[in-house]
Amino acid sequence: MAPQTQGHLAMLVFAALVGGSFSLGALAADAIAPLAFNALRFWIAALILGAAVLWRGSPAGAFAAPWRHVLLGTLYALYFWLMFEGLRTAAPVSASAVFTLTPVMAALFGRLILGQRVTARLAIALALGAAGALWVIFDADIAALLAFDIGRGEAIFFIGCVAHALYAPLVRRLNRGEPALVFTLGVLLAGAVALTLLGWRDIRATDWTALPGVVWTALLYTAVFTTAVTFVLMQIAALRLPAAKVMAYTYLVPGSVILWEMALGSGLPPAAVWAGLALTAAALALLLRDEDRPPAPPRAAPLPDPPAPMA
């Protein structure tokens, strides 16, 4: 399987898993402090990945220059903390609306950090994805879209999304060839330490034995699937795709959230919403085309004429 195909498949799974974190996170957000919740989920995820790394064996020098892990771990910890802080007042689908702003920010950071260019086709794909996502988010209601109002929870989560968008190009810039699993473990450990230091007061104040079952369900799901697994998926994709393409898959998250909400008993969205999902599918179809193929080699013209220009 081609490396780019691996990156695209990783992000498809990423979008499906992330949708569950919005829905389950909203159910648990009022029952536990976000810092305490996310500190524990990071430690659980780090234990899972740590066991996998020990089983496979860690290459020499895998954790060289640990400042890289500290920087990336802090960014991802900030994203998860502010996501759950925002979900205290923002609805899951509304929060996922904010999440769809990350592709544009990722494209900007990718340009600044990696020099990645945004082609016309990629720009069209991003625009289509954004339009489709907004159509889904506002239930195909133009009046609701025009009356868009950012609440406190959405504003808090937006700061986290900036950190998330910055993470994708920095992974590619800072990785020195370490395996995704090993590098991710370093990032997770750094994030766990950062969250523990920031949330120590909340951790001590939490009555862990009295937490409702939904908190433990959300904790285990987010620790295993949307921390350990998505960390690895993001790492795989970021090393194979431009930052804007990686983050463009966030346009699938609102549709994923709707499916999760349906599964949890929230019912079907209006039929017109599926037009928005079709737009996001069209955007991804553009992204799936191989944009980075090298140009064809030049064809030499008959001598003594100079070689023809590259196609």
Image (tube, rainbow, N blue to C red):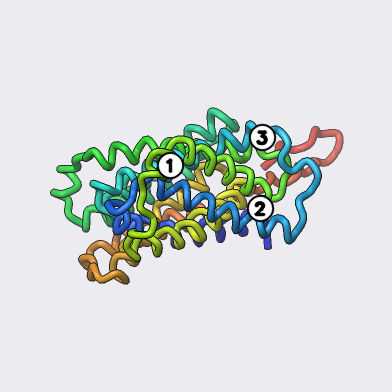
Residue 100 in view: no
Q: Are marks 2 and 1 in contact (CB under 8 Å)?
A: no
Say if 173 sits above or below 189 in the image: above
Q: Residue furthest top?
A: 112
What is the spatial separation of the Cα atoms under label 3 and label 1, in whole angstroms?
Answer: 20 Å
Residue bearing the label numbered 1? 79
Instruction: Say the numbered circle drawn on residue 66.
Output: 3
SS at circle 3: loop
Identify the image quadrant of residue 69: top right
Q: Amino acid at mark 3?
A: Pro
Identify the disc placed on residue 158.
none
**Dot 3 crowding, Cα within 10 Å, few <14, some 14–19, many 20+:** few
**Residue closest to the eye, 139 or 41:** 41
Seen in the image, is 244 located left or right of residue 130? right
Amino acid type of the residue tagged 2 in the rendering: Leu
| Along the viewing direction, whichever of 200 and 160 lies nearer the viewer | 200
User: Of label 3 and label 1, which has the lower sequence position?
Assistant: 3
From the viewer's perspective, tell me whether residue 216 is left or right of residue 190: left
Q: Dot 2: what SS?
A: helix
Query: Are the residues flagged by discs 2 and 3 in contact, CB closer than 8 Å?
Result: no
